[in-house]
Image (cartoon, rainbow, N blue to C red):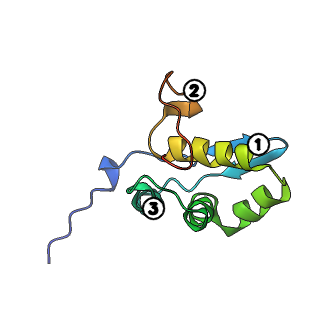
Amino acid sequence: MKVLDITDKLKDQEQPVLKVKELELPINDDAVSLLTVMELMEDGNMTPSNILYAAKTIFGEDGFEKLKSLKLNTENFETVISEAIEVVTGNPEGEPENPGTTSSMTGI
């Protein structure tokens, strides 16, 4: 059997962290998490259960529990999830979105 080691072709990965108030929430930016969230968003209509599932996927159970402890209102919770999605989908360094491209949970 021939084994090809492609490890040196892979880019180094540093896990992004989203800071919300006093908490730092590591973001799961691995391909499986990204694809899971993209699948939830593909019809353009995020249901409440999909939003919660996306949050748990992006932040993991521990991060999600920390996020819940902030007791954010709906608008702020939506902002946190939207920003995390922007990070995992490739928005560099959490830079602000371009004008006219803001998204909401109903049509991310």
Label 1 to label 2, Cα distance in Å? 15 Å
In this rendering, the label closer to the viewer, 2 or 3:
3
Question: Could one spot residue 104 in this view of the protein?
Answer: yes
Mark 1: which secondary structure? strand
99, 68: nearer the viewer: 99
Kindly identify which residue carries mark 2. Answer: 96
Q: Residue at x 73, y 50 (%)?
A: 74
Kindly identify which residue carries mark 3. Answer: 40
55 in relation to 13, above or below: below
Residue 53 is drawn in which quadrant?
bottom right
Question: Could one spot residue 16 in this view of the protein?
Answer: no
Q: Which mark is residue 20?
A: 1
Q: Which sits earlier in the primary sequence, circle 1 or circle 2? A: 1
22 in relation to 100, above or below: below
At label 2, the amino acid type is Pro
Mark 2: which secondary structure? loop
At label 3, the amino acid type is Leu
Furthest toward the top, the residue is 99
Furthest toward the left, the residue is 1
Q: Which sits earlier in the primary sequence, circle 2 or circle 3? A: 3
Residue 47 locus on image (x, y percent): 55, 62
Residue 81 locus on image (x, y percent): 62, 49
Label 2 to label 3, Cα distance in Å? 23 Å
Q: Is residue 7 left or right of residue 4?
A: right
Mark 3: which secondary structure? helix
Furthest toward the bottom, the residue is 1
